[in-house]
Amino acid sequence: MRIQIGYKFILGFVLVVAAVAFSPEVVRRLGYSEEITKVLAYVVALTIGLILGWIFSRTFTRNISLLTESAEFISRGDLTRNAVIGASRFPDETCDIGCSINRMVESLRELVRRIRETAEKVSISAKTLSSSAQEINVSGEEVVHAMEQISRGAENQAEMAGKSSRIIHDMAISIELVAKRAREASSAARETSSAALRGKELANDSLERMKSILENVDAAGRQFMEFTEKLQRVGKIADFIGEIARQTNMLALNASIEAARAGEYGKGFAVVADEVRKLADGTGKSAEDIIQLIHAIREESRLVQHAIVESSKHINEGRKNVDVTAASFQDIVQTVLETERKANSIADLSHIQTEGAGKMVQAVDEFAKMARDNAASTEEVSSATEQQAVAMQEMTRAAQELAGLSDTLLRSVECFTISADEPPQP
Amino acid sequence: MTDGRYLVFAVTDQKYALAVEDVAEIMNLPALYPLPKAPAYYRGLMNCHGRPIPVLDLATLYKRVPLDKGGKILVLEGKTVTLALLVQRVIGIVSGLHSADQEDGGDYGVETSLSGDDGTIRGIYLWPRQGNISAA
């Protein structure tokens, strides 16, 4: 049963008063003299009051001293002990204070443990942070170095990009020239094509003409054959005439002989026979001349015929050549058309290339600009990295300070003892 | 024989002349019928209007070279004998031949050289005329 201290005092006071009040009555019953009774009553009352007061105050005082002792330990930093308040039938505020002190000690212990752990962790973290910061610092320096290299590289890149741009520009001009040349080649191919077509037509025309020439030559050959045959017939006739002339001659000779043998009577006949013989001689000579002429003509006509055959052969070969020429012209036309197509395609491709080169120039210019920007950015990054390095150094310092602070914190909470095996720090 | 008409003929490039009066006929070469064991210049017999007459090859006789082909036959008709000469060709009847030199003897009646308008012609006397016989 819980009774507050105030009520306990009041109860005690009431008991003391009641004891004082009732003690004379009790003493009186003992039957002592008035005087003695009076004194005894006072003594008894006083004694009872003292006894009751001691009884009442004893627990209270003990509890207060226990609490004081606990507070004393706490103030010394010894958090190992709890305030042990004896169990009482009538607990009062001291018990509450003890419990509170115990809770406080518990909380403090927890707090100190936490602080200590945290401080240790902070210390470790700070050290880690410090080393990390140092590493970061080193890395930052490397980064600065790398950034400088990148910056130089970027400048080189920008320069190279400029050069590339110029080269590509030159290339674009060359490609433009190529396109122009290809167009010229295309038009030349077109002209060649039309010339080849004209040549083909001419060759075909020549072929036709040669065919007609060949036909004419064949006809001339046939006519010449007929002519030769007729000439042979003439020759035969001339031969016949010659033969007749010879016979006539012989007859005339015989007539002359007969006339001679007839003597004086045959003289006139001899003259006639002589004339006949002369005529026959003339006829024979003429026939001989004709035959010789025919021989000469035949010789010449053989030559002419040979020439005709030769020219026919030549014309045939010429026709073959013209055929080949026409075919060649056809091939040339094909080839030239192909060439024209290719040249056109080269021109188109060159145009596309020119556009591509222009785009490439733009791209390279942009690339150069980007490279310059990059260079600037890397310089900025470099300075930022340097600033970062400074910051990291500051951070290192701060981390070291933090480590020192956490050490200090640890030292400050080391005066608190939280377990029994750990001796309290002075 | 400084006057008269002559029949001029040729045997292997050599011209010869005969008096026209001695010649009976000129013929083309007919079919010949050779006689066995006869001399080489004796070509055989020929049919002349039904009469067989011997044919002498003058080329073989004078030049020892037989006439290869062709040729004319001169039929000579004398008072005692009729024979035929195979000559290469007959040139014609000429007149006015002059005797260059008179030579006696010689083979087969060749007696004189006659100069004509176209070179020397050898004259042949076949039978005795004016009394001199030179050929057998």
Image (tube, rainbow, N blue to C red):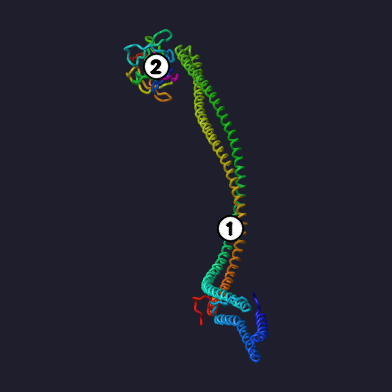
- Nearest the eye: A397 or B23: A397
In-front residue for pair A148/B111: A148
What is the three-letter code of the residue carrying label 1? Ser
Q: Secondary structure at mark 1?
A: helix
Relative to A336, is A91 above or below?
A: below
Give the x, y percent position of residue A184. 61, 52
Question: Helix or strand or loop: what does disc 2 sit on?
Answer: strand
Give the prevailing secondary structure in the magenta stretch.
strand
Report crowding for label 1: few under 14, some 14 to 19, many 20 or more residues within 10 A (C-alpha): some
Whether B90 is among the magenta residues is yes
Chain ID, mark 2? B
Q: Residues within 10 Å of mark 2 (few under 14, many from 20)?
A: many
State the mark number for residue A146.
Answer: none
Q: Is residue A366 magenta?
A: no
The image position of residue A229, as x and y in percent, is: 53, 24
Q: Which residue is at the front of the view, A207 or A223? A: A207
**Discs 2/1, front:** 1
Tell me which segment is drawn in magenta.
B84-94
The residue shown at (44%, 12%) is A261
Above or below residue A303? Residue A287 is: above
| Quadrant location, the C terminus of chain B | top left
In-image side of B21 versus A344 (left or right): left
Q: Does B113 appear above or below B25?
A: below
Quadrant in which the N terminus of chain B is drawn: top left
Chain where mark 1 sits: A
**Gap between marks 2 and 1, in whole Å?**
107 Å
Q: Is residue A182 above or below residue B79?
A: below
Q: Which residue is mark 1?
A: A174
Q: Which residue is mark 2?
A: B86
Residue B134 in view (yes/no): no
Q: Amino acid at mark 2?
A: Leu
